[in-house]
């Protein structure tokens, strides 16, 4: 039986899922986390069997060894394993990659040049590709880009007020979380096609957070820009920041580029504001003034960007929450949606706290949804399409 493996490689983790190549049924998914510190493998099969395994025996320390552990688990879980294609999440596609591509040496080298634009993600995405090429030398490797969904923005939503040569050189608003947005809008098209065809704002709220304005199924605006630092505050990233702050830190405080990068990418956001954690669950439980202020700022920025996204769309028909916080933190959803009656938006408190798919009130003109995003399935769909184009027959669910 042929399978498609999807990989989402980060600095200290690899998330994976296995799919039947012909039906896209998913027999197993999981992750290796704690690479470099305390590696651990966890997984869940379609029939509910769970694995939680400590990997601190010294055999797993990098992406290649983590992939070997993943493959061993898959082979132990399934009797017939033949991974025919591997789909990878790649955060930045730059100017040249507006759709998934089959990876070869030239394209891998191209993607390495984009590392400075996504230093928190791109190096590890590419490490995952190299590890998969070594583990599955005869399998098709497909890169699926988080920036691709946003590549058809109107020019005014894509540019900065800099001389045109910089735009031509690639300094522009790329937007990210595209695989999540693509999955969510496809799901909305199934459950509420009329709303999906209209003016939609999707809020992907998690350790990485952004919002996207979608018109007729197409991205027309994003809170993220040239890098994944812009827009909303995130777990450890600052979000929107006056560029003058960076200049001040360099010229007056003497911080190096490397020190500023660490500050903005890993020591800011919810973690930096609270002085406690980047985990919303911990912040809500802590109840300290600093934790409360971090949450308040997070909510304020979401509300501010929701107004901006509605302005881009000239109105709003649907608001969707997704991501770890968006899907699970009912208090955050409630705070975000407070006093938006002027926009025609009102939550149903009971539905919201229960985490139902539709959480808006009957009076609300704007429909509010919770949709559990599934980037792995989106990657699998793109990889299946590439496999089919290469001459394999496939039935996509």
Image (spheres, rainbow, N blue to C red):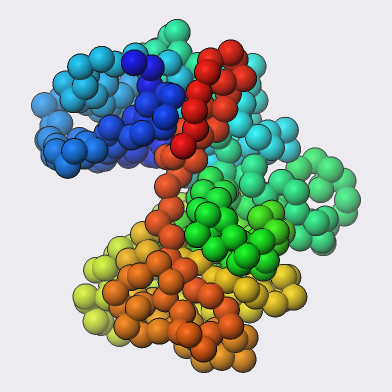
Whether 117 is drawn above or below 131: the answer is below
Whether 95 is drawn above or below 302: the answer is above
**In the displayed structure image, the side of residue 36 where residue 384 appears, left or right:** right
| Count of numbered labels shown in the rendering | 0
Query: Front-most of 244 and 198?
Result: 198
Q: Is residue 367 visible?
A: yes
Q: Is residue 243 visible?
A: no
Where residue 351 sits, quadrant-wise, is bottom left
Q: Position of residue 209 (x, y in %)?
A: 48, 60
**In the displayed structure image, the side of residue 312 where residue 293 appears, left or right:** left
Q: Position of residue 232 (x, y in %)?
A: 53, 67
Whether 14 is drawn above or below 128: the answer is below
Q: Position of residue 278 (x, y in %)?
A: 33, 62
Query: Front-most of 250 and 133?
Result: 133
Query: Front-most of 302 and 292?
Result: 302
Residue at (42, 40) in percent of width and height = 376
Residue at (39, 13) in percent of width and height = 136
Residue at (82, 47) in percent of width and height = 166
Q: Position of residue 24 (x, y in %)?
A: 41, 32
Residue at (51, 89) in percent of width and height = 363
Q: Residue furthest top?
A: 138
Picture quarter with the N terminus: top left
Whether 84 is drawn above or below 48: the answer is above
**In the displayed structure image, the side of residue 312 where residue 133 appears, left or right:** left
Query: Front-most of 354 and 43?
Result: 354
């Amino acid at each position: 039986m042929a399978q498609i493996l999807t990989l989402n490689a980060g600095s200290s983790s690899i998330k994976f899922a296995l799919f039947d190549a012909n039906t896209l049924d998913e027999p197993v998914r999981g992750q290796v986390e704690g690479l470099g510190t305390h590696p651990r493998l966890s997984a869940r099969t379609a029939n509910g069997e769970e694995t939680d395994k400590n990997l601190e025996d010294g055999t797993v320390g990098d992406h290649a060894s983590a992939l070997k552990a993943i493959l061993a688990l898959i082979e132990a879980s399934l009797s017939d394993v033949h991974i025919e294609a591997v789909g990878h999440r790649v955060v930045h596609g730059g100017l040249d990659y507006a759709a998934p591509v089959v990876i070869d040496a030239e394209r891998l080298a191209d993607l390495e040049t984009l590392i400075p634009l996504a230093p928190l993600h791109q190096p590890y995405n590419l490490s995952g590709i190299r590890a998969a090429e070594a583990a599955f030398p005869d399998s098709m490797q497909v890169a699926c880009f988080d920036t691709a969904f946003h590549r058809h923005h109107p020019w005014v939503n894509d540019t900065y007020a800099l001389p045109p040569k910089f735009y031509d050189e690639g300094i522009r608003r790329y937007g990210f979380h595209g695989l999540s947005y693509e999955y969510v809008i496809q799901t909305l098209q199934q459950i509420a096609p009329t709303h999906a065809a209209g003016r939609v704002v999707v809020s992907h709220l998690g350790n990485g957070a952004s919002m996207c304005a979608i018109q007729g199924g197409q991205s027309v605006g994003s809170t993220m820009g040239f890098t994944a630092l812009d827009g909303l505050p995130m777990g450890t990233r600052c979000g929107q920041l006056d560029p003058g702050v960076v200049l001040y830190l360099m010229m007056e405080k003497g911080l190096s580029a490397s020190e500023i990068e660490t500050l903005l990418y890993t020591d800011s956001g919810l973690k930096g504001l609270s002085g406690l954690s980047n985990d919303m669950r911990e912040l809500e439980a802590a109840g300290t003034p600093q934790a409360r202020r971090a949450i308040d700022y997070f909510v304020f920025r979401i509300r501010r960007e929701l107004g901006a996204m509605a302005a881009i769309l000239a109105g709003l028909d649907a608001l969707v929450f997704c991501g770890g916080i968006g899907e699970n933190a009912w208090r955050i959803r409630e705070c975000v949606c407070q006093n938006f009656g002027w926009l025609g938006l009102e939550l149903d408190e009971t539905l919201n706290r229960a985490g139902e798919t539709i959480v808006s009130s009957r009076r609300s003109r704007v429909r509010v949804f919770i949709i559990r995003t599934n980037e792995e399935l989106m990657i699998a769909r793109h990889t299946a399409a590439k496999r089919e184009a290469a001459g394999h027959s496939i039935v996509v669910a």
